[in-house]
Amino acid sequence: MDLIPVKIGPLNPQVQDLAVGVVLFAVCFLCLVPLLRRINRVLEAREQATDGAMGKAERLRALAEEKRAEIEAELADARHDAARTRQRAEAEGAALIAEARAEGIRERDELLVQAAARIDSDLAAARAGLQEYLPELAADLASRVLGEPVGPDAPTRAADAW
């Protein structure tokens, strides 16, 4: 018995064939339903595990970002502290250099004053010492210039020259 009353060849199925096909389909479907349910459960568990792992990864990434931001802030503070310390050290060094320079100039001025006083006293002593020999030295120099003895010990030729 054909399902369709028109003769269309092999495209016209028989009712018995259709009944057997439906029964076999139902049996196969009923056998596969538990397997499909199990596959769906595995897929859902896998998706939850994946989503859970991704959520955990997102939380860890956010925590890492917070820690990185904290560390960068601490590094920035440390850099600022180092810059302030370096600037303070440079200022203190400049002040020490200026103080040492002023001390050196003051000591130099003291040495110059002492040297000038010593030179003045030595000059006065030399003048006093030479004052005593001044008539003799003058007579000796005049003798050398004139080529004749001059002075109190020299023979008087002034009367002879006139």
Image (cartoon, rainbow, N blue to C red):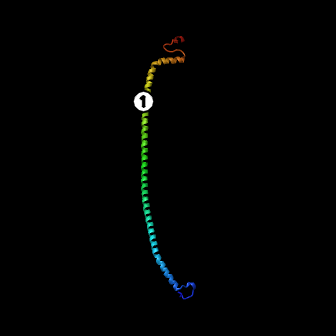
Q: Quadrant of residue 10?
A: bottom right
Q: Position of residue 68 (x, y in %)?
A: 43, 57
Location of mark 1 (residue): 114
Q: Which quadrant is home to the C terminus? A: top right
Q: Residue at x 46, y 76 (%)?
A: 33
Q: How many marks?
A: 1
Q: Toward the viewer: 13 or 65?
A: 13
Q: Position of residue 100 (x, y in %)?
A: 43, 38
Q: SS for tag 1? A: helix
In this orientation, does residue 162 appear? Answer: no
Q: Position of residue 43 (x, y in %)?
A: 46, 70
Quick one: label 1, few (<14), some, or many (20+) residues within 10 Å?
A: few
Compared to 38, does 147 lie above or below?
above
Q: Please, which residue is most extreme toward the right here?
A: 9
Q: Residue at x 48, y 17 (%)?
A: 136
In this orientation, does residue 20 appear? Answer: yes
Q: Position of residue 46 (x, y in %)?
A: 45, 68
Q: Toward the viewer: 42 or 71?
A: 42
Compared to 120, does 99 lie above or below?
below
Q: Amino acid at mark 1?
A: Gln
